[in-house]
Amino acid sequence: MKAKFAVLGTLTAAIVTAGAGISAAHAEADRQAGPRAVPLVRYFDGLKHYVTSGARPGPKYREEGRVPILASSLPGTRAIYGCFAGNVSRDQFLTGAADCENNVSSSKNNTFIRREGFLYTSPGAGRRPLYRCYVPHTKSHFVSVRSDCESNPPTSKVNAEFILGYFPYAG
């Protein structure tokens, strides 16, 4: 069997080009490489952001960046969910709350989209924080690896809401 492997930080993907499966040696190599990661991608359409480990939300959205998140739960991680805000048009956000923060939201009608993946709950070696950010004038949430949420005063006011979690980082 021939297989091609691409390694991007902690993200490892195997594409089997021939044969019926991956050999025991390849399976063991994958296990030792660490937990499987998937890309969490930040998109922007000129007004609104959309962050997902799923498909691009539409043709107008352009990729702004990506970070690896875990595909499955491990000790010390929590699930991250994609949701739509119930009181704002096209405001998609990420949260650690499976109810999409309806227990704390004044509108109580946020909508669950999907489970995106998993982030570590605490800092550690080989981990970087992922911040949830909010742009008040466009009512748009997004995520950033920067604690200032890439705010560029005085032309834009962006609020860092909190650390969503910590993603695996090999760099």
Image (cartoon, rainbow, N blue to C red):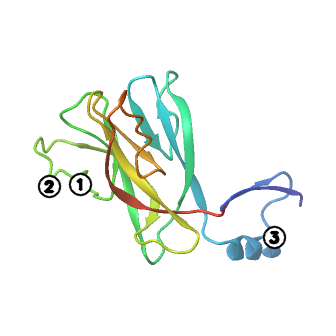
User: How far across and down, in percent of the image, does residue 10 sit?
Assistant: 65, 62
> Distance of mark 1 from mark 2, alpha carbons?
7 Å
Residue type, numbered disc 1: Asp
Q: Which residue is mark 3?
A: 23
State which quadrant residue 97 falls in: bottom left
Camera-side mark, 1 or 3? 1
Residue 129: x and y in percent read 46, 60
SS at mark 1 in the image:
loop
Residue marked by disc 2: 103
Residue drawn at (41%, 45%) of the image: 149
Above-or-below relation of 38 to 60: below
Distance between the alpha carbons at the discs numbered 1 and 3: 41 Å
- 62, above or below 102, in the image: above
Q: Where residue 87 is drawn, which disc sits there?
A: none
Q: Helix or strand or loop: what does disc 3 sit on?
A: loop
Residue 99 - label:
1
Q: Secondary structure at mark 2?
A: loop
CB-based contact (under 8 Å), mark 1 and mark 2: yes
